[in-house]
Amino acid sequence: MEALSLVAVVDATDPVDVVDDPRRRLQTAFQACCDGLYRFILVRVGGRHDVADDLLQQTCCIAAGKSLVPSAGGDCEAWLFGIARNVVRKHWRSERTRGGVLPLLDADGGGELVHAMESGPLPAAVLERGEATTRLLAAVTALPSADQRLVFAFYFDGCSHADIADANGVTPKSIEAKLYRIRRRLRDLLANPTKEGGS
């Protein structure tokens, strides 16, 4: 997905050296989490890119219209995920009114996939299980953007710990430890879907 322009958030004529400008914080946070935010929305609208594009645009516009923007980067990302979650809920309320159907999620199957992640990248045969994969992707896309990128690189794209470590300037052991913590978080999200969030 091509990153969305934030013309509505930051006017190009604004001075660049403004200290602690909320619009600059929002632009920075959005650029850092745009892909993760898009995946978060896309999974929750059943993989429909046209709908996800519209809802991401709505999320951006709503965020741009807010007068208070969280000051910390992580807080700002979680705040954006919260707005996106509300936009998706509103979308599905509207769909229900028109007779649309919510996608089904198989919690047990998602848990089985997280268990399969213990041994390394997920094989194609495992990923072909539709409902279980949808449930797993819902949990993965509820993670912060940096964690999402790590999960997709290792489990879906098949990159090694060493490759990911080189790209991030860390040791393979630190990547292994991070993936272990992410798997624990995924198990928690799958066991308690109400904890889903962008932080």
Image (cartoon, rainbow, N blue to C red):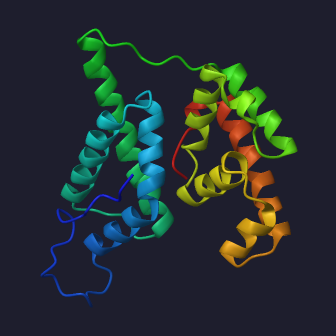
Q: Residue at x 24, y 64 (%)?
A: 6
Percent x, y of residue 174: 80, 68
| On screen, residue 116 above or below 154 | above
**Residue 67, image quadrant:** bottom left
Query: Which residue occupies the foreground of this view, 196 or 165?
Result: 165
Horizontal side, residue 162 vs residue 49: left or right: right
Horizontal side, residue 77 vs residue 68: left or right: right
Most distant residue in the bottom direction: 17
Query: Which residue occupies the foreground of this view, 45 or 167?
Result: 167
**Residue 96, image quadrant:** top left
Q: Residue at x 38, y 71 (%)?
A: 28
Percent x, y of residue 72: 46, 70
Most distant residue in the left direction: 13
Most distant residue in the top direction: 99
Q: Which residue is drawn at 71% across and 22% down?
A: 109
The number of numbered discs placed on residues in the rendered structure image is 0
Percent x, y of residue 33: 45, 59
Q: Which residue is drawn at 82% across and 34% down?
A: 115
| On screen, residue 162 above or below 3 | below
| On screen, residue 195 above or below 20 | above
Percent x, y of residue 71: 40, 70
